[in-house]
Amino acid sequence: MNSKKRNRSDMFWGYLMVAPTILGLLILNIYPFIETFIRSLSKTKAFGKYEFQGLMNYQEMFTSEEFWKATWNSIWFCVLTVPVGIFLALLLAVLLNAKIAGRGIFRTIYFLPMVVAPAAVAMVWKWMFNAEFGIINSIFGTEIRWLTDPKIVLITCAVVSIWSSVGYDAILLLSGIQNISPYYYEAASLDGAGKVKQFFCITVPMVSPTLFVVIIMRLMASLRVYDLIYMMVDQANPALTDAQSLMYLFYRESFIAGNKGYGSAIVIWTVFLIAIVTALQFIGQKKWVNYEV
């Protein structure tokens, strides 16, 4: 009996400890998702009321050229930012792990862009990329329309996104690199392996679990990018169609056009894309993620 009472007491305190997290998950994540899905099947009416209309929003969404363009823009933004950003973050993490003077200061400096408000970051870079008086065109003596040329506007936004996130990703990867035993590098050096070979044969495999998490986080953030594009590309910008992401389209439809049912359908589609990308990552991790120490 004492053993059963002790087990019940342990279960009670265990459930009590995780209750705030479970309640937060239900209130802040699961309930809003269910509410969004219900609204995606409804038509927005006056005074915040909704009328159920089935799959009409999805039918309208999948037949819209603007929607498919926004989907492609979001995917293309991922292609532009994730591979380059992850590579630079990993390279930066290796450099920050080296024994150099003042490396603590450098770690702080590279992390600062993540602390600065995204709106401030976007406004500064928007001024730098200005075609008429921007500092970038002034330095290189060019007249490139960085934010109004449909061919390069998304690339411009991708550059800013990489700059603002590479420091944070590097710090996460640095924590994984610091968990690698130095004996692996010493043994490799005795065998004649150079720094480059040590990087690809020791660092990358051993830091792959952390790298896997960082890649998933960056993919999710890139697919739901909104604030950066909203701040850098005005609604009157002729290149808006070529820069508009799914979340930007959601904002326009929900809060400007007032069509929250259609906007909710866009959110569900974005969640579906994120789920597919995450599932593919978990399936593929068996081939390249090394959990052995």
Image (cartoon, rainbow, N blue to C red):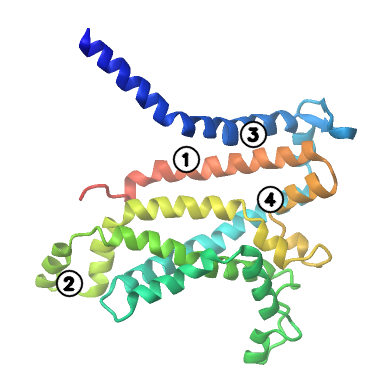
CA neighbours of label 4 inside 10 A, class few (<14), some (14 to 19), many (20+): many
Looking at the image, tell me whether mark 1 or mark 4 is earlier in sequence order: 4
Looking at the image, tell me whether mark 2 or mark 4 is earlier in sequence order: 2
Q: Alpha carbon of mark 1 to alpha carbon of mark 3: how far?
A: 22 Å
Residue shown at 47% from the left, 62% from the top: 83
CA neighbours of label 1 inside 10 A, class few (<14), some (14 to 19), many (20+): few
Q: Looking at the picture, which amino acid does disc 1 mark?
A: Ala
Looking at the image, tell me whether mark 4 or mark 3 is earlier in sequence order: 3
CA neighbours of label 2 inside 10 A, class few (<14), some (14 to 19), many (20+): some
Q: Looking at the picture, which amino acid does disc 2 mark?
A: Ala
Kind of element beneath mark 1: helix
Asked if disc 1 and disc 4 are in contact, CB closer than 8 Å, the reply is no
x and y percentages locating residue 169 in the rendered image: 44, 61
Kind of element beneath mark 2: loop
Asked if disc 1 and disc 2 are in contact, CB closer than 8 Å, the reply is no
Taking depth in this image into account, of 218 and 282 the one nearest to the observer is 218
Q: Looking at the picture, which amino acid does disc 3 mark?
A: Pro
Foreground mark, 4 or 3, reads: 3
Foreground mark, 2 or 3, reads: 3
Q: Could you say which disc has been placed on residue 193 in the image? A: 2
Asked if disc 2 and disc 4 are in contact, CB closer than 8 Å, the reply is no
Q: Is residue 140 above or below residue 23?
A: below
In the picture of the structure, the residue carrying the numbered disc 4 is 247
Q: Alpha carbon of mark 1 to alpha carbon of mark 4: how far?
A: 21 Å
